Amino acid sequence: VVGGDSVGRTTGSGQGSIFKTNNGWRGQIMLGGKRRSVSGKKKSEVIDKLDKLKSEYNSGNYAKQSNMTLEEWYNKWLAMHASKTLSEDSLSYVRWMFDKYISEEMKSMRVQDLDRRTLDTFYVETFSGFSRNTVQLFSVEFKRCLEAAVDEGIITNNPHHKLQLPKTKPPKKVFAYTAADQKKIVNYCKRRL
């Protein structure tokens, strides 16, 4: 029962059930004649996910179930959407960033299973100590990728929206020679030739 203490008991349509698994908790709910399943490490996480599904269904803001993985989606997005707005070099760079920084485990996740907690963990574990520029470049494109999934009806909202990025390394200080020092260097080089 969503929000209750029962474990493993099925109730009427739209109520749902929650049960313990080897890896955590799993919940199921019937919406519009189709069974939807969610999982999580904590029972409270599964309850929240089921409540969210019910709320989305009741408000008409409900995405059809899709088994599309993040890797499948970002490859489709790169081919269908990003290629229209990015240069060939930029597109190659975005593909390289996605392949390099997104773990195999996360690539194999269903897009519909991504949530803010998963993305928070991903950014902290992956980008701690990176330059601000690198994190922001990746973040902008990843957010666009997930926003396109919303537009396509694969997910109902973008878990990347208003995501707080981890602290990054401060930019390196650049020391430039003064004009007088530059002249001295040029004169020195001329004398050496």
Image: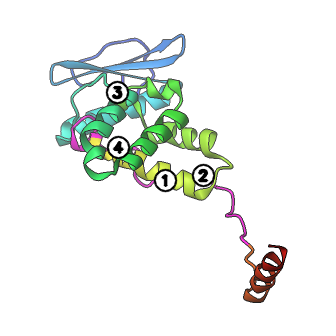
Mark nearer the N terminus (1 vs 4): 1
Residues drawn in magenta:
149-174
In-image side of 80 versus 86 (left or right): left
Q: From mark 3 to mark 4, how far is it between C-alphas?
A: 12 Å
In percent of width and height, residue 32 lies at 15, 24
Q: From mark 1 to mark 2, how far is it between C-alphas?
A: 14 Å
Instruction: Name the residue nearer the viewer: 142 or 37.
Output: 142
Q: Are marks 1 and 2 in contact (CB under 8 Å)?
A: no
Query: Mark 3 = which residue?
Result: 72
- Tag 1 secondary structure: helix
Residue at 75%, 82% in the rendered image = 182
Q: Quadrant of residue 186?
A: bottom right
Q: Amino acid at mark 3?
A: Glu
Q: Amino acid at mark 4?
A: Cys
Q: From mark 2 to mark 3, how far is it between C-alphas?
A: 26 Å
Would you say residue 82 sits in the magenta stretch? Answer: no
Comparing labels 1 and 2, the label whose residue is closer to the camera: 1
Q: Does residue 145 sit above or below 190 in this rendering?
A: above
